[in-house]
């Protein structure tokens, strides 16, 4: 079976590279810059558990036509590029091709189904962080399996993902899982504003209180909509803000047993700010604001984080934890 990773940046190169290292037939489609980097260095895939895999021969194309022969497409573009990527794929992929959305956010599956009417669209998500360390090196810094909506079209690929060390975790209903991941991803903005590695940021109670405020606001809105986020950690998501507010010494004990984060882990939003790229803030915290608007309510904490990230996209400076918390509490 032919697999194409479409929009292969950090997540795409890591997931596709692991599949390729496991013996799958994988091609990549993405930007010229990444194609040149991979052509020069190949791929090196590392993770927090000590894995260190190298792939020298990598087929990395820059034209959508390279996806024409794919049986399975893994879409890993940023959420803002979903519509454009779907239109490109619609013109080249075969009817019946399985297209898995490995993207942040909630609505990408719906966007893809509107445009890929002859293909099989399967919503999914990547729960772990991947850091692009440059020169073809991509590092998985946190734990998690690949989450997808259950679908029979995935059956031929389950073994290949397992062999690659990236098992597919299939769900009857992916939406509660997506919302749980989004609740965790509300930290992306806080981490990017802190300018710290994830573990260093989360070790400071003031930053955790910022995340707790964003999550508590979101959980109240989800409850009003009748949405119960899936349990993806040892603690139910509705209790997570209380855990985040714990004193540092208590949280460190909890984190050591529940959150596997290595010192290299960063968020993709931090990477985007450092590279001067637009972030996905409108598809993360923005979903919370839209949820509030549907109820005729407001989400001031998440709205403020959106404002701060948009400012940081043009003028990025680190926010100390106490200063950021005061800004969110206004």
Image (cartoon, helix red, strand yellow):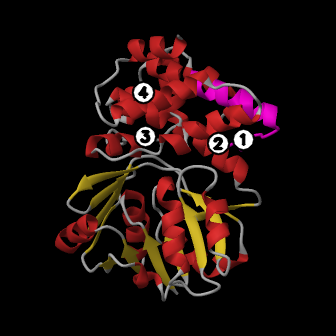
Q: Where does label 2 land, which residue?
A: 180
Question: First in sequence: mark 3 or mark 4?
Answer: 3
Q: Main secondary structure of the magenta part?
A: helix
Spatial CA span between label 1 and label 3 = 22 Å
Q: Residue furthest right?
A: 226
- Residue 115 shows in the view: yes
User: Mark 3 or mark 4, which is nearer to you?
Assistant: 4
Q: Position of residue 314 (x, y in %)?
A: 30, 35
Which residue is found at the position 21% from the left and 74% from the top?
Answer: 39
Q: Position of residue 266 (x, y in %)?
A: 36, 41
Residue 129's tag is: none
Question: First in sequence: mark 1 or mark 2?
Answer: 2
Q: Are marks 1 and 2 in contact (CB under 8 Å)?
A: yes
Q: Where does label 1 land, which residue?
A: 229
Q: Which residues are magenta?
A: 212-231
Q: Where does label 4 land, which residue?
A: 308
Which residue is found at the position 78% from the left and 32% from the top?
Answer: 223
Q: Where does label 3 land, which residue?
A: 261
Q: Secondary structure at mark 4?
A: helix
Q: Are marks 2 and 3 in contact (CB under 8 Å)?
A: no
Spatial CA span between label 3 and label 4 = 25 Å
Which residue is found at the position 19% from the left and 69% from the top?
Answer: 41
């Amino acid at each position: 079976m032919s697999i194409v990773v479409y929009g292969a940046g950090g997540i795409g190169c890591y997931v596709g590279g692991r599949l390729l290292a496991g013996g799958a037939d994988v091609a990549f489609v993405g930007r010229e810059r990444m194609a040149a980097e991979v052509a020069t260095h190949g791929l090196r895939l590392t993770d927090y558990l000590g894995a260190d895999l190298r792939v020298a021969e990598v087929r990395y194309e820059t034209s959508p036509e390279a996806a024409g022969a794919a049986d399975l497409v893994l879409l890993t573009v940023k959420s803002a590029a979903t519509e454009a990527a779907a239109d490109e794929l619609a013109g080249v992929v075969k009817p019946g091709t399985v297209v898995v959305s490995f993207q942040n956010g909630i609505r990408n599956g719906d966007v893809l189904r509107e445009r890929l009417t002859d293909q099989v669209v399967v919503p999914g998500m990547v729960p772990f962080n991947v850091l692009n360390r440059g020169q073809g090196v991509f590092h998985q810094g946190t734990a998690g399996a690949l989450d997808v909506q259950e679908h029979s079209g995935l059956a031929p690929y389950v073994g290949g993902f397992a062999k690659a060390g990236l098992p597919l975790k299939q769900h009857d209903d992916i939406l509660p899982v997506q919302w749980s991941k989004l609740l965790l991803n509300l930290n992306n903005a806080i981490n990017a504003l802190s300018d710290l590695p994830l573990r260093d940021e989360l070790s400071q109670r003031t930053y955790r209180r910022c995340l707790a405020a964003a999550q508590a606001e979101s959980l109240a809105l989800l409850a009003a909509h009748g949405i119960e986020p899936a349990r993806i950690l040892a603690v139910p998501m509705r209790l997570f803000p209380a855990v985040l507010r714990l004193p540092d010494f208590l949280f460190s004990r909890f984190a050591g047993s529940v959150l596997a984060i290595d010192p290299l882990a960063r968020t993709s939003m931090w990477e985007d700010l450092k590279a001067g790229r637009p972030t996905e803030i409108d598809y993360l915290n923005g979903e919370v604001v839209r949820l509030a608007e549907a109820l005729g309510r407001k989400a001031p904490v998440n709205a403020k984080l959106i404002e701060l990230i948009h400012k940081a996209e043009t003028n990025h400076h680190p926010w100390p934890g106490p200063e950021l918390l005061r800004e969110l509490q206004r």
